[in-house]
Image (spheres, grey):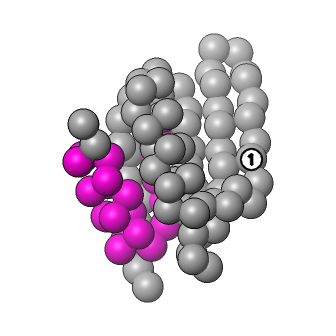
Amino acid sequence: MKNESIIIGDEYDNELINLLFIILKEMGATKINETEALTGSQDYYLASFNINNSIITVEIETYIGITLNGPSELIRIIMDRINNKP
């Protein structure tokens, strides 16, 4: 399976972040690990999730945004769900 990495939005978009975590939960994602850091003016968050034996990472970083990384097919499913939520 091919992996891809995409920026899905701004790091300060709390509505999108909450929606992403709701969708991951609905998909049965299990958090594998989580790291948070604050360095100067930059916030950093990284979490890995297992969804049906596939690994998705969520990275939220100041000045970069919200990044999803994982199997292309799974990324597309998550993006479809984000784009189709009311």
Residue at the location (57% across, 69% down)?
51
- Give the residue pinned by disc 1: 34
Relative to residue 53, is residue 74 depicted above or below? above
Give the residue at the far top of this rendering.
41
In the picture, the quarter occupied by the C terminus is top left
Front residue of 84/75: it is 84
Give neighbour class at mark 1: few <14, some 14-19, many 20+ (Cα, 10 Å). few
Residue in the image at 46% along x and 50% along y: 23
Q: Position of residue 17 (x, y in %)?
A: 48, 34
* 68 is higher (above) or lower (below) than 36: below
Which residue is found at the position 60% from the left and 61% from the top? 29
Q: Is residue 16 found left or right of 22 in the rendered image?
A: left
Whether residue 64 is visible here, answered yes or no, is: no
Residue 75 in the magenta stretch? The answer is: yes
Q: Is residue 52 left or right of residue 74?
A: right
Q: Residue at x 50, y 55 (%)?
A: 26
Quarter the N terminus occupies: bottom left
Of residues 74 and 5, the one nearer the viewer is 74
| Residue 8 seen by the camera | yes
- Picture quadrant where residue 79 is located: bottom left
Residue 40 location (% of width, % of height): 70, 15
84 or 64, nearer to the observer:
84
- Taking depth in this image into account, of 20 and 57 the one nearest to the observer is 20
**Residue 39, position as x, y percentages in the image:** 73, 22
Q: Amino acid at mark 1?
A: Glu
Q: How many marks?
A: 1
Residue 82 within the magenta-colored segment of the rendering: yes
Range covered by the magenta-colored residues:
64-84
**As drawn, is 6 to the left or to the right of 49?**
left
